[in-house]
Image: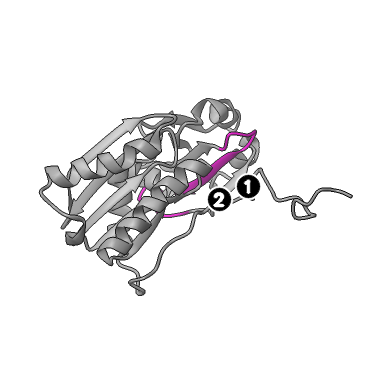
Amino acid sequence: MKILAMDSAAASCSVALWQDGNIIAHRFEEMTRGHASALLPMADDLLQEATNTIEEMDAIAVTVGPGGFTGLRIALACARGFAVAAKRPVIGVTTLEAMAESEKGQGQTILAALDAKRADLYAQYFDADGKQLTDPVARMPEDIVAMVPADTKDILIAGDCFDRVENLFLEKGIKPVAAKTRVPDARAVAICAAIKGLPSDPNYRPSAFYIRPPDAELPKNGGRLRP
C-alpha cells in the first residue's frame, strides 16, 4: 500500500510517502507562513523523487487539527484535490496523534501539546505506546497538568509548550522531559494513517477538527446594517 501524507497545521510544512511499512521519501520545512505556496511544490518534488504519481497512491493522509485555521485548510484542500483527481480516499490524522506517534516507544507517558495562540493549549495524553489516554482538549496549562494520568513519575512533552507547563509539572513532583518533536511531521501522519487503514467509504473526506469554536463568528443579525 502507498500513502501520500501532508501537514501544514502548525509552524512547518511537510509531506511524506509511505510504502509497505517504510517512509521512502520525505520533505520537511519549518515556516510560520507561506504554507500555501510551499505545500504543492513540495508534494510534486517528493513524487518525482520517488518516481510515483498521485494515481499510484492508495490513499491520501492529512492532519485535520487542532492547529492554525489557515494552515489546516491549506493541507485539507490539497488532500481533497488530490483525492478527487486520483479517486482515492482521504485518511484524517490529528496533529496530537502525529506528535505522539513520533515519540512513542520511549517508556514514558506522552503529553502532546500545541500553542492555541490564546491563553490555552491544545493537548492530549498518550501512553508510551501512543495509545490515547484522554480526549483532545483546549484548556489552560494548569488544567491540562491537572489531567495528568495517576502514578505518572515523568512525562515526555511533545509540541511547542514545554516552557508553559514545565514548572507546573515540577510542582506536582513529576519530571517533565522535552521531546524532540515540536510540530507534526508528515512521516508520523503517514504511519498513523497506515495504522488506521483505509476508510470503508472510498469517497470519505475528513473535515477540520478545531476542538473549540473559531474566534471570529458571524454576527447574530447575519451581518445586516442596523436600521
The tally of labels here is 2
The answer to whether 150 is drawn above or below residue 197 in the figure is: above
Q: Could you tell me which secondary element the residue under label 2 belongs to? A: loop
- Between label 2 and label 1, give the one nearer the viewer: 1
The percent coordinates of residue 187 (x first, y second) are 27, 45
Q: Nearer the viewer, residue 163 or 151?
A: 163
The percent coordinates of residue 209 (x first, y second) are 52, 54
Give the quadrant of the N terminus: bottom left
The answer to whether 45 is drawn above or below residue 52 in the figure is: above
Q: Quadrant of residue 144?
A: top right
Looking at the rendering, the stretch of residues picked out in magenta corresponds to 116-132
Q: Nearer the viewer, residue 106 or 210?
A: 210
Residue designated by label 2 = 210
Left/right placement of residue 198 relative to residue 172 reads left
The answer to whether 157 is drawn above or below residue 86 in the figure is: above
What's the amino acid at mark 1? Answer: Pro
Mark 2 vs 1: CB contact within 8 A: yes
What's the amino acid at mark 2? Answer: Tyr
Q: Could you tell me which secondary element the residue under label 1 belongs to? A: loop
Q: Nearer the viewer, residue 86 or 112?
A: 86
Residue at position x 53%, y 47% in the image? 149
Other-residue count near label 1 (Cα within 10 Å), few / some / many at <14 / 14–19 / ≥20: few
Visible residue check, residue 130: no
Residue designated by label 1 = 214
